Amino acid sequence: MNKTPSLTLLAALLTLAAALGSNRARAQSAFWVATAGDGKVSRVDLVTGTANPVASGLNSPYGLTFDEHGRLFVSDTFNGAIKELAADGTPTTIASGLNYPSGLSSGCGGLVVAVYGDGCFSSVQLTGNRSALACGFDGALSARPYRNELMASPDLERSLWVWRGSGVGGVDLVRHNPDGTWINQQSIGTGLSYPYDAVPDRGGNVFVSEYGHFRILEFPVLSSGAISTNPVVFASGLNPVGLAFDHMGDLYEADFGGTINKFAFSNGMLSTNPIPVVTGLNQPTYLAFPPPPRVRLHWTGGDVKLTWPDAMFTLQTADTLTSGFATVPGATSPYTNGITAGTRFFRLESK
């Protein structure tokens, strides 16, 4: 894989403080899509508009996500399994015997999986251990992380959970408490017709695919930080299933009819006009963008802990910005750096 120094992030670790410098968000060149009709996961090149299969032989995959380390996971739904896909598409089964696993997201130290057949949202660890987080739903469809970047909030994990029974469902905003329990912070929408997915934009507004009414709904965030329960129709005339925002703020929609549509973000506004990105897919369901090239810094006593998507990037270090950067031997995320006298700089370079 070619090196791309243009995707470099620099982190300066000082004796008494830690600071992070980064490039402005850059347009992403690709995303991944699962297609139920042919059991594939494909990489969509946004420059050429082509979809190149990276994995096949799946049975109606409904669920696709990257974790914070850049590892790709898919729900092999009708086979009852969660699989990790290597860069060459080679699958490794993480969990099996699940009752129709659907949407999934990174969280709880592993994955949060919507298990449709059980009506449960469950935690699945990469070791294969799993436990139910919450049950009693008519059918669990999707789990997505929720964050409002424009408002200060406690550093608690929050998630959007989509559920549906015989056609009618809704969306809940749930919160992961420090004691490990989950509570329903807010019921956002109920009485929705065949909802499939829900994702937030940078400001915390929630977008929901309502397949039964051929539209995408927007639930605006209020000044209080709560989410309005009175949605507006964002776009209609669609067959929407999976939704995903890229790092530039553009919204992508997996249209079950075979198209991936883009709603462009420009001048502070999200366009309501769909732009076809790729067509001719066989029942696309869920989308996944790789995590951004971001270093997170955690201050712990006399140490700084760095985390980054290490499946995609290599950590490098230097004493000054003008000196040569060298790869940190054996560094994997999370990496602990002891703070000593002077300044050290770190950057990420794509593998």
Image (cartoon, grey):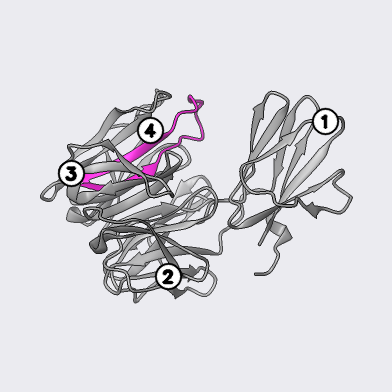
The outermost residue toward the left is 166
| CB atoms of marks 1 and 3 within 8 Å | no
Q: Residue at x 64, y 43 (%)?
A: 295
Residue 169 badge: 3
Residue at which label 1 appears = 340
State whether residue 31 is above or below residue 305.
Answer: below
Question: Could you tell me the amino acid type at mark 3?
Answer: Gly
Q: Residue at x 50, y 56 (%)?
A: 71
Left or right of 60: which side holds 155? right
- Distance of mark 3 from mark 4, alpha carbons? 21 Å
- Distance of mark 3 from mark 2, alpha carbons? 29 Å
Question: Could you tell me the amino acid type at mark 1?
Answer: Thr
State whether residue 255 is above or below residue 322.
Answer: below
Q: Which residues are magenta?
A: 138-163
Identify the image quadrant of the N terminus: bottom right
| CB atoms of marks 1 and 2 within 8 Å | no
Q: Earlier in the sequence, mark 1 or mark 2?
A: 2
Residue at which label 2 appears = 42
Question: Could you tell me the amino acid type at mark 4?
Answer: Val
Query: Of the residues tagged 1 and 2, which is closer to the observer?
Result: 1
- Distance of mark 1 from mark 2, alpha carbons? 46 Å
Question: Could you tell me the amino acid type at mark 2?
Answer: Ser
State whether residue 264 is above or below residue 156.
Answer: below
Horizontal and vertical percent position of residue 124 = 37, 46
- Distance of mark 1 from mark 3, alpha carbons? 54 Å
Residue at which label 4 appears = 221
